[in-house]
Image: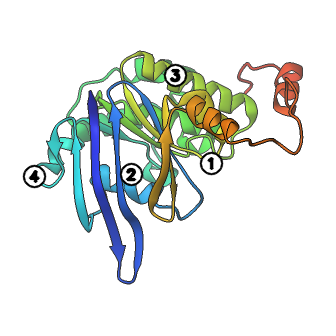
């Protein structure tokens, strides 16, 4: 069953078309990836679905709700990852969660929420005092305050070290196991292959292919594709993690 349905979505800025007739569906409970180079239209597409940006034409439904008719109802059932500029600098993590809960008119247990993203011991820290991985985990925690059916993560692991990246993967997988639908953008293809049930590859504002990662890889191999350099059973990231461990070592 599709919890997100997008039909012929278009976004134009004067002479430039950022999104050019995109159509796709996201099934309830899956992790769906939007992949593509910078400027492909991924973030614009997400912002339209999130009700943050107006579309030029096309149709969007979220959990059966028509974006054109009830955008406020859509806002109630989604969680959007905030950037660092969205956090008040003088409040600690516990206070920030209490603030956002008040804005959502929700009752939450701040410590339980912090515990769910392995940040309980940072409750009295300010956001700026966190490491990169901790900031990303806290940002994801804020998306969960209103108990959303769907969360949107825009390049959540950019700039993180391998340990922090793998630990964030575990958190995203746990969210899926809890029944949350996740839409993610990433420039890391190994990340998409690890996390996503299905992906759509976007270029120049259009979707050029979509399927499961395994099927897309199999289609490429069936076409006769061969890598110029043969890959080994492990890569340098595996070496790094094997030597340093996968456990969090954040200050």
The residue lying toward the viewer, choosing from 128 and 189, is 189
Q: In which quarter of the image is the C terminus?
A: top right
Q: Is residue 111 visible?
A: no
Q: Which residue has dot 1 on it?
A: 187
Query: Which badge, 4 or 1, comes first in the chain's sequence?
Result: 4
Task: Measure the C-alpha gap from mark 4 to mark 3.
Answer: 32 Å
Residue 59: percent from left, percent from top: 21, 54
Image: 198 above or below 9: above
Q: On the rendered structure, is 59 left or right of 113?
A: left
Query: Which badge, 1 or 3, comes first in the chain's sequence?
Result: 3
Mark 2 surroundings: few (<14), some (14-19) or many (≥20) residues within 10 A: many
SS class of the residue under badge 1? loop
Query: Which badge, 3 or 2, comes first in the chain's sequence?
Result: 2
Q: Which mark is residue 173?
A: 3
Task: Measure the C-alpha gap from mark 4 to mark 1.
Answer: 33 Å
Query: Which badge, 2 or 4, comes first in the chain's sequence?
Result: 2
The answer to whether mark 4 and mark 3 are in CB contact below 8 A is: no
The answer to whether mark 3 and mark 2 are in CB contact below 8 A is: no
Here the colouring is rainbow
The residue lying toward the viewer, choosing from 58 and 89, is 58
Mark 1 surroundings: few (<14), some (14-19) or many (≥20) residues within 10 A: some
Q: Residue 69 carries which label?
A: 4
* Image quadrant assignment for residue 141: top left
Task: Measure the C-alpha gap from mark 2 to mark 4.
Answer: 18 Å
Q: On the rendered structure, is 221 left or right of 84?
A: right
Question: What's the residue at 74%, 33% (across, down)?
Answer: 162
Q: Quadrant of the N terminus?
A: top left
SS class of the residue under badge 3? helix
């Amino acid at each position: 069953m599709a919890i997100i349905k997008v039909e012929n979505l278009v976004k134009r800025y004067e002479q430039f078309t950022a999104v050019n007739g995109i159509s796709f569906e996201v099934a309830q409970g899956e992790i769906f990836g939007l992949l593509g180079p910078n400027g492909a239209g991924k973030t614009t597409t997400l912002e339209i679905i999130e009700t943050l940006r107006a579309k030029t034409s096309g149709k969007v439904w979220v959990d059966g709700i028509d974006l054109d008719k009830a955008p406020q109802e859509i806002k109630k059932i989604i969680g959007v990852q905030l950037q660092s500029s969205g956090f008040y600098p003088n409040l600690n993590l516990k206070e920030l969660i209490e603030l956002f809960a008040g804005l959502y008119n929700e009752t939450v247990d701040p410590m339980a929420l912090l515990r769910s993203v392995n940040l309980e011991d940072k409750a009295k820290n300010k956001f700026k005092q966190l490491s990169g991985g901790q900031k990303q985990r806290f940002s994801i925690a804020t998306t969960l305050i209103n108990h959303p059916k769907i969360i949107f993560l825009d390049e959540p692991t950019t700039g993180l070290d391998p340990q922090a990246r793998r630990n964030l993967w575990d958190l995203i997988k746990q969210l899926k196991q809890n029944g949350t639908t996740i839409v993610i953008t990433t420039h890391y293809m190994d990340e998409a292959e690890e996390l996503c049930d299905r992906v759509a590859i976007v270029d120049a504002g259009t979707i050029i292919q979509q399927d499961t990662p395994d099927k897309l890889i199999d289609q490429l191999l069936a076409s006769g594709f061969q890598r110029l350099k043969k890959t080994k059973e492990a890569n340098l990231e595996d070496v790094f993690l094997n030597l340093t461990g996968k456990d969090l070592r954040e200050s």
